[in-house]
Amino acid sequence: MRRALDVARTAGEDVPVGAVIVGPDDQELATGVNRREALGDPTAHAEVEAIRAAVRQLGDSWRLEDCTLVVTLEPCAMCAGAAVGARIGTIVFGAYEPHTGACGSVWDIPRESPLHWVQMRGGVLENECGQVLREFFDARRGW
């Protein structure tokens, strides 16, 4: 999660969310940072960017069954669905997202999917992950 926090801090003007995909050998395969504003792309969330990069890194499959997605914020419905579609084995996230979280807060897409069941763990370094977001939004609000 500390690596995902480091990645989140590189988001620039975008909401600082960072994602890391770790392979079955515990080696980092790919990272992703939220780039929705930078790219003008509503699908450019950190998780989707990391999944795309991991698939490119592997080169021979879109299936990430033995991989772990580590992300600083609970994935939304789109990102949880992308993780299920990519057959991610485990999702580990930091801060809960009570408004749009789709890994247990509002929905529970990874554990309810008839396609692929994903192991999950939330709240890892929750305070640190939440602090990065609070600082970002406080600066935007001028607090």
Image: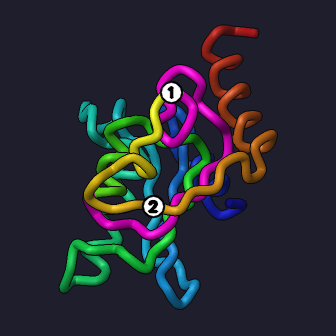
Residue appearing at x 32%, y 39% in the figure: 78
Vertical comparison of 113 with 67: above or below: above
Vertical comparison of 67 with 12: above or below: below
Image location of residue 37, percent across then percent down:
36, 30
Given contact means CB atoms under 8 Å apart, are the residues at marks 1 and 2 in contact? no
Check disc 2 and report the residue beneath it: 118
In front here: 71 or 12?
71
Where does the magenta region start and end? 85-105
Residue 11, numbered label: none
Relative side of 94 to 65, left or right:
right
Image location of residue 40, percent across then percent down:
25, 31
Is residue 133 magenta-colored? no
Query: What amino acid type should be assigned to the residue bearing mark 2?
Result: Val
In front here: 97 or 50?
97
Query: What amino acid type should be assigned to the residue bearing mark 1?
Result: Val
Is residue 92 magenta-colored? yes
Q: Quadrant of the C terminus?
A: top right
Check disc 1 and report the residue beneath it: 106
Q: Quadrant of residue 43?
A: top left
Residue appearing at x 73%, y 53% in the figure: 124
Vertical comparison of 97 with 74: above or below: above
Residue appearing at x 45%, y 61% in the figure: 118
In front here: 47 or 106?
106
- Prevailing secondary structure class for the magenta stretch in the rendered image: loop
Marks 1 and 2 sit apart, C-alpha to C-alpha, by 17 Å
